[in-house]
Image: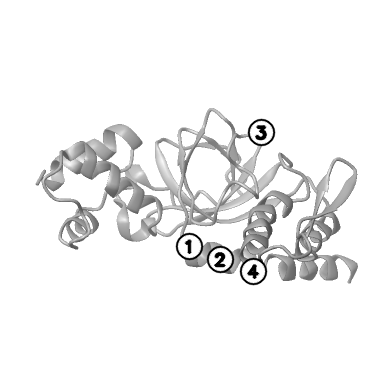
Amino acid sequence: MASSDQIAAQILSTKSLAVSPTWLDAFLSSGTAPRNVPASALAKTATFRLLTSDIRESLSKHRSCVLPTNVTNPNVQELRLHGPIPVQVLDIEDIGTSLWSQIEAIERVERGEAIRGREIVRTIAVGEDPEVSENNRSNNNNAAASGNSGSGPHRLMIQDAAGTVATGIEMQRIEGIALEKLAIGAKLLLRNPTVARGMVLLTPGSVTVLGGKIEALDKSWREGRKARLLEKTSSLEG
């Protein structure tokens, strides 16, 4: 089997992710890693696992790979981060679409409806196989949950390998950042973004979407999203 150093070097060169030696050793000794395959193949499998892991456990906490401690300080007028810095998404909000529009989109999905142009169409056919209906609802849920595909801009809560949590604001449209596309736990790579007053300013040139998902976090987030939106509307009305 290829050595852990070879695999770590491959992941670093292809994805700019500095893997924790402890995590990588555990992966290689778990019995789930393929045997007698090239380092490149093992690196691809390890990368897939990394993208579904908590980076606080799987990636290096070296200061060159994490956010600075003053990243959330609103008194710092401007700060340029050095990169690449990997982060994982803990929350995503569409701040360009009204709360009620997003709630109504979720409720349309709950009723088994979807928007096609200006029409509301049923997505569950009478007499349709229950399993097929469930698959259709699942497929429509992500696409309709944000109200309109391609909406935004978005506000993200991001976390680095050291556990530091910061807020990122989408300054320009970034492919792959959308409620129906970006899962909770997805990994992003930050390359020299600007931080202004405690906000990380996200642009296409400073963000690479690596993908991935932390299944338990994503499931919990999506199940509780409507309640969170309703709570926000109540606080605004109050």
Few, some or many residues within 10 Å of mark 2 (<14, 14–19, 20+): few
Picture quarter with the C terminus: bottom right
Q: Which mark is residue 215?
A: 1
Q: Which mark is residue 219?
A: 2
Which of labels 3 and 2 is toward the front? 2
Which of labels 3 and 4 is toward the front? 4
Pick the front one: 31 or 97: 31
Q: Earlier in the sequence, mark 3 or mark 4?
A: 3
Residue on which disc 3 sits: 173
How far apart are the alpha carbons under marks 4 and 2? 6 Å
Amino acid type shown at disc 3: Arg
Q: Secondary structure at mark 3?
A: loop
Residue on which disc 4 sits: 223
How far apart are the alpha carbons under marks 3 and 2? 25 Å
Few, some or many residues within 10 Å of mark 1 (<14, 14–19, 20+): some
Horizontal side, residue 224 vs residue 158: left or right: right
**Residue 157 screen position, x and y as percent:** 57, 54
Q: Does the residue at mark 3 contact the one at mark 2 (Cβ under 8 Å)? A: no
